[in-house]
Amino acid sequence: DAEERNKQIKDGKLNHTDLIDVRLFGAVTAEKNRAKGHYTEERHGKQDNDQVTAEENRAEGHYTGPVQFNWGYSLHPVEIVDSSTSTSSFSSGQGIFNDYRVHYSLLAFSGSINANAAQSTKLSDEDLSLFDEAILKAIPLARTRSKIGQYPRLYLRIELNGKDQFLKDLRPMINIIGKSGVIAENLRLIRKPDDYKLDLSRLITYLKENEGKISQIHCFRDDQLEADNFEDIFVNKAWKHELSLL
């Protein structure tokens, strides 16, 4: 809990921003004041009788994460596999669960990094490089049942010029095209990457329209993912910074 976590940080003579997950995703460091019966924010190195402003409490008790993600969704219609029912036992008792799966889905996620929040949590360029690596390697290295068969196909992290710049959600600008006539008419029949390709025309047009905002694009594309116009994403060839799973 927060009390134990704060104790470990204090014992190690650390601050919360020494932890990369806090620098990336933020944290709430409040712990319960057992004498007063309510939650108070952990204050680095300050005693209860020290004067602490509300601003200091907010800053040190609640770190807003610079990295924020939206819910993912499939870029094409999917077909659900017939569900199975399983029974599992937990300490709280036995439960019955339905296991819902799809034959195939190209799931897309969108996120952003807030420059002002990044300054507050002391997020660094090195942190973002580790973040890129984690995004690409975390799922392939996972051995959990829910991650079997999942693999990163495309990753774009677009760096912008200036803190006040932003781009729209890029996912609606990516179109899926079935390679065969049957699949083109019914995208629910997609079963593997070889069944489709990406049309990035609308995305490329949007990036051209916002060329002045962009400083660099960190990218990864899996060899199995076909996108005829992928290289046209880099309107300015100097933008391209290629990432690897190796």
Image (tube, grey):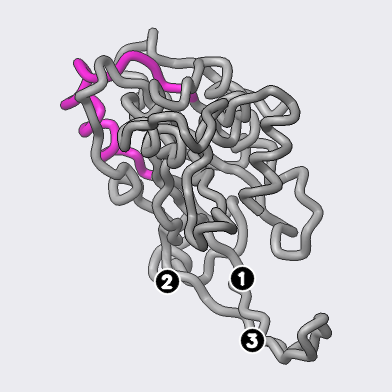
Observer-nearest residue: 1 or 75?
Answer: 1
Extreme-left residue of the structure: 209
The quadrant in which the N terminus is found is bottom right
Residue 55 found in image quarter: top left
Give the label on residue 82, or none: 3
Residue located 61% across and 57% down the image? 192
Q: Is residue 233 magenta?
A: no
Magenta residues span 199-218
Quadrant of the rendered structure where residue 114 is? top left
- Circles 3 and 2, Cβ within 8 Å, touching? The answer is no
- Residue type, numbered disc 1: His
As shown in the figure, which amino acid type bears the numbered disc 3?
A: Asp
56 left or right, relative to 84: left
At x 44% / y 16%, what residue is drawn?
A: 240
The residue located at (47%, 34%) in the rendering is 49
Mark 1–mark 3 distance (CA, rounded to whole Å): 10 Å
Q: Is 213 placed above or below 77 here?
A: above
Side of 127 relative to 237 (left or right): right
In the rendered image, residue 56, in percent from the top left (x then y), is placed at: 37, 31
* Residue 186, disc: 2
SS state under label 2: loop
The residue under label 1 is 103
User: Type of residue at label 2?
Assistant: Asn
Q: Is residue 228 visible?
A: no
